[in-house]
Image (cartoon, rainbow, N blue to C red):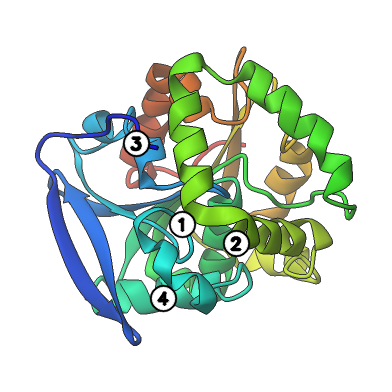
Amino acid sequence: MKPPPYSLNGARSRTVQVGSALVRYEVYGSGDPLLLIHGLAGSSAWWDRNVPALSQNFSVYLVDLPGFGASRRLKSEFSIASGPEWLASFLAALDLDRVSILGHSMGGLIAAMFAARWPEKVDRLILAAPSIGLSRTTLASHLSPVMRAAFYTRLRFIPRLLWDTARAGPVTLFRSAHELLGMEVHQNFHRELCTITAPCLLIWGERDVMVPVKLAEPLRKAIPQSCLRIVPRAGHVFMCERPEVFNDLVLQFLSAGKRSQPTR
């Protein structure tokens, strides 16, 4: 099985030592650092329709979380609960003291956890349908939403989804999904959200069945300096489904963040 085409011009591919492992990452553009964090069963390739626009004004850092994509060999070293600490080690290895972070789904949860525990390291925070507040339930009960989400997914994205799912493998996916839905990482986390000091943009797809839009408003109320934007006619992977709308929302927020606080 061959991966679907994925290439972006201007990439600076590098490796860095994080703990005992060499981690590959890519940088695009120039300017203030912006780190993109993918979701469950994903990889940094999920941002291919966003990087060209975002890298016009920022140094965009792409990295695959351990167990996924190019970092799949590191699967034994990663869990969602340890994700924020891994990010802290990764940023320290890059000598980045303060960054803006954009995280999608599971990556959004990890980004929020990081921002809550190291608020001084986060300039601005964008959470794209973060997996926070999901009902505590079984994996089997989520098969229907997964199938419905696949129905809404654009055909051009399905090869990438299948390739990244295969690269992660069933063990990593099952373990991460079980941890996510079991809410082990969520216990007392809502209390931590109030410690996030960075201006925060929440973005949701109107038709998201994986992380329902009903979870958005409670999260907006819990995070100080947060605002919420809904992408019409979009599902869970809306940065791929409606990239122009998504890119505009992110760039407007990042540009306005230095001049004024986001409106609620």
**Residue 174 sits in quarter:** bottom right
Of badges 2 and 3, nearer the viewer stands 3
Q: Quadrant of the C terminus?
A: top right
Amino acid on which disc 3 is placed: Lys
Query: Residue 128 in the image: x percent, y percent?
Result: 55, 40
What is the crowding at mark 4: few (fewer than 14 residues within 10 Å), some, or many (at least 20)?
some
Query: Residue 88 in the image: x percent, y percent?
Result: 41, 76
What is the crowding at mark 1: few (fewer than 14 residues within 10 Å), some, or many (at least 20)?
many
Front in this rendered view, residue 261 or 199: 199
Contact flag, marks 3 and 4 (Cβ < 8 Å): no
Q: Can residue 209 be seen in this snapshot?
A: no
| 90 with respect to 65 (left or right) | left
Residue 68 is tagged as 1
Q: Under tag 1, what secondary structure?
A: loop
Amino acid on which disc 1 is placed: Phe
Residue 172 is tagged as 2
* Mark 3 lies on residue: 2
* Mark 4 lies on residue: 88
Contact flag, marks 2 and 1 (Cβ < 8 Å): yes
Front in this rendered view, residue 233 or 7: 7
Of badges 2 and 4, nearer the viewer stands 2
Q: CA distance from mark 3 to mark 4?
A: 33 Å
Query: Residue 35 in the image: x percent, y percent?
Result: 34, 54
Mark count: 4
